[in-house]
Amino acid sequence: MTADETGARAARLIIAPDPEAPRLTRAVTGTDQTGAEREIRVVEERPLTIYLNAQEIVTAMTIGDYPEYLAVGYLANQGMLRADDTLTGVDYDEELETVVVRTARVTDYEDKLRRKTRTSGCAVGTVFGDMMEGLEGLTLPPAELRTSWLYALAHRINTMPSLYLEAGAIHGTVLCEADRPLVFMEDVGRHNAVDKIAGWMRMEGVPATGKMLYTTGRLTSEMVIKTALMGIPVLASRSGFTAWGVEIARQVGLTLVGRLRGQRFICLSGEERLIRDADPDSAPQEPRRSSRKAAAE
Amino acid sequence: MTADETGARAARLIIAPDPEAPRLTRAVTGTDQTGAEREIRVVEERPLTIYLNAQEIVTAMTIGDYPEYLAVGYLANQGMLRADDTLTGVDYDEELETVVVRTARVTDYEDKLRRKTRTSGCAVGTVFGDMMEGLEGLTLPPAELRTSWLYALAHRINTMPSLYLEAGAIHGTVLCEADRPLVFMEDVGRHNAVDKIAGWMRMEGVPATGKMLYTTGRLTSEMVIKTALMGIPVLASRSGFTAWGVEIARQVGLTLVGRLRGQRFICLSGEERLIRDADPDSAPQEPRRSSRKAAAE
């Protein structure tokens, strides 16, 4: 696929990465192995303090785009925003680096804030209270996952212009429907990227039915839990698994596909949703430049 | 280097990865792209609750090795253990999944615990209080960083038997001296790996002078701050940079080398410590299997 075609197709996303945005990367100068001066672009990392009504909840280190989505998605994924809560305001103050999320319901999570779990998620791995909270009795909707979609999505996502290709050192999470990427969020913290998607879905009223999440990061317990709490039945990654991530996915009936690179992948949970409609040999090879290794991403 | 040579040299590390340890990985069965059944090993991820004297500080998700080092290193890197504190006990309870660190000094960090920052670090990205705390007026010792050491360390670390090569989805951090890896810690959370090294140094009384840290993960603000607080003047990674990570490294005079793969690297801070004594073309190439991409690791 040529750059033009990629651009044209990327334009069809509802939200696509914006590698040109001046606020998201910075040019820095150093030297390379030969001693030659080299200028490279690096991603920004900024604090964003999230308030729920009068209460300071957390300060996230984020690349800084879509702060409102990040705040709402974080609170929703932490169970601090209920499905039936009415948002009366979401106010971002760029100077103060704060987002205040206001609800009609009076909220108080002081006790919850006292309990802290540092998770295995990449960046922003903080979960308050019981990580499994809200998973009891959760059932995910039936869904189809065609291997032809997996191959098309992986190829398109990995070749689309992104901050990752521009500056590296950043995670991507993509909300997809069939073979189409809808919303592609990137962040220094993988969990920020997921939370931004959750916030977008919540604020735009987009249902989870028929959706899947693709992430560049590892399939850890926290990623699986977030995906399940969002009601999304399929989570795919080019990276690997942790044992607890697999265990929880099997408990809640989430389809978990990992180590998705080129034609290869492994499905460790929810096999029943998987339809092998594509000849693996027909899967597009990854261009060297955009190939990401399934390291501890 | 042959497997035997690798093993022999790895044996010279004070602490090396233990990919065979049954408690650290689990075999899980799934299917691959062809529908064939596949058994793979995945890394474990367990909660570990850290107490400082009577106070519950945090629950970390960790692979579970070296819990005492993790607890002591975490508390030290959070500034909750002072350099002059006397440890009167470090008690790990495997059943309760807790570590209680006891000090002669009476401690109370209730206020500090109220402030939470979610950082860009991979896993365990929780920093209480002011991230920059302790950095004011910090000066790192002069040191030498020879490119011949960088190339030798990167090759040896990436080809040494490890949980990463066995199961993937895990980070590594290595305490090095000249061209010798001393302590190689792996964890689902990159920050756990660093904290385990900090705890080992603290409990074994190992000084930071002449040491460098090598990490598989990104050079974020938190990684740079942790390294500086440990008094280590050099931080190298095969992964990329964030803008704030570079900024802080330059402020504290830390030598920061990133994107170190094969013969290539970029130095964005502390260039004065770098001695280019190796012909880049002489740098060993990375075996395909152990090559890690500098994605958002």
Image (cartoon, coloured by chain):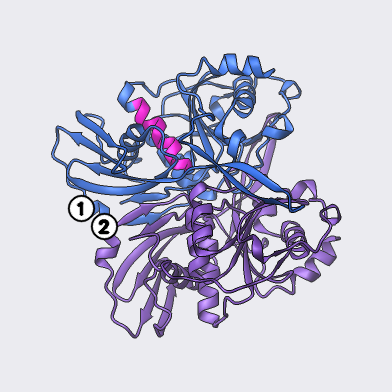
Chain colours: A purple, B blue
Q: Quadrant of residue B90?
A: top left
Residue B194 in magenta stretch:
yes
Cβ atoms under marks 2 and 1 closer than 8 Å: yes
In x, y percent, where is residue B73? Answer: 34, 35
Is residue A48 rendered magenta in the image?
A: no
Q: Quickly name the residue at label 2.
A: B114
Image quarter (top left, top right, bottom left or bottom right) of the N terminus of chain A: bottom right
Q: Nearer the viewer, residue B23 or A79?
A: B23
Q: Chain of mark 2?
A: B
Q: Position of residue B89 (x, y in %)?
A: 21, 30
- Mark number displayed over residue A288: none
Q: Secondary structure at mark 1?
A: helix
Q: Which residues are magenta?
A: B189-201
Residue highlighted by disc 1:
B110
Give the residue drawn at x 73%, y 56%: A158
Q: Is residue A141 above or below residue A84?
A: above
Residue A47 vs A11, above or below: the answer is above
The chain holding disc 1 is B
The picture places residue A23, in percent across and down from the top left corner, at: 57, 62
